[in-house]
Image: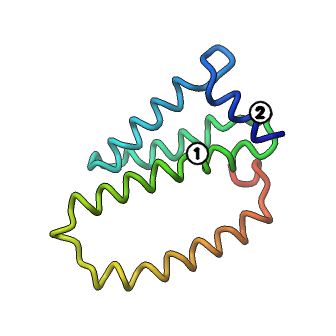
């Protein structure tokens, strides 16, 4: 039920919802990933700060909301810069990033929303 609560909160308009805030964060995230230095970090911090504390697991849901957006932006950026991409380096770093994701999942299992904030 907690995910349903978060989706209801995230997709409704103010004063009770966060739709405008999340659209703004997505715009800032796109600008940051598009090349404006520091804005992707600001968007990530804004996502954490605006995650609802009254919804159980709200921070995890907020981060999960960002993952598909980040994935699409990264795929587009790789396609856009495909001629300059250093594939040997990508293939070298890719397995390490998967290890990092697994470690992150394990650590996330032990953290509360309050601890992550």
As drawn, the residue found furthest toward the top would be 15
Which image quadrant for residue 91?
A: bottom left
Instruction: Pick whichever, 53 or 57, lies toward us.
Output: 57
Secondary structure of residue under mark 2: helix
Residue under circle 1? 65
Is there a contact, CB below 8 Å, between mark 2 and mark 1?
A: no
Residue depicted at x 75% and y 41%: 3
Residue 26 in the figure: left or right of residue 109: left
Give x and y (percent) for residue 87: 27, 80
As drawn, the residue found furthest toward the left would be 83
Residue under circle 2? 5
Instruction: Pick whichever, 33 or 48, lies toward us.
Output: 33
Residue depicted at x 62% and y 34%: 50
Mark 1: few/some/many CA within 10 Å (<14, 14-19, 20+): some
Q: Colour mode?
A: rainbow
Secondary structure of residue under mark 1: helix
Give x and y (percent) for residue 82: 21, 67
Residue depicted at x 45% and y 38%: 26
Q: Distance between the residues labelled 2 and 1?
A: 14 Å
Give x and y (percent) for residue 97: 49, 75
């Amino acid at each position: 039920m907690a995910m349903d609560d978060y989706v209801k909160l995230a997709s409704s308009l103010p004063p009770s919802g966060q739709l405008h805030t999340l659209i703004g964060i997505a715009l800032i995230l796109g600008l940051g990933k598009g090349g404006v230095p520091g804005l992707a970090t600001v968007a990530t911090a804004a996502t954490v700060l605006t995650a609802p504390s009254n919804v159980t697991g709200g921070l995890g849901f907020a981060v999960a909301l960002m993952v598909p957006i980040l994935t699409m932006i990264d795929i587009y950026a790789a396609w856009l810069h495909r001629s300059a991409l250093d594939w040997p380096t990508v293939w070298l770093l890719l397995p390490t990033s998967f290890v990092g994701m697994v470690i992150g999942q394990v650590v996330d299992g032990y953290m509360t929303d309050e601890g992550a904030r």
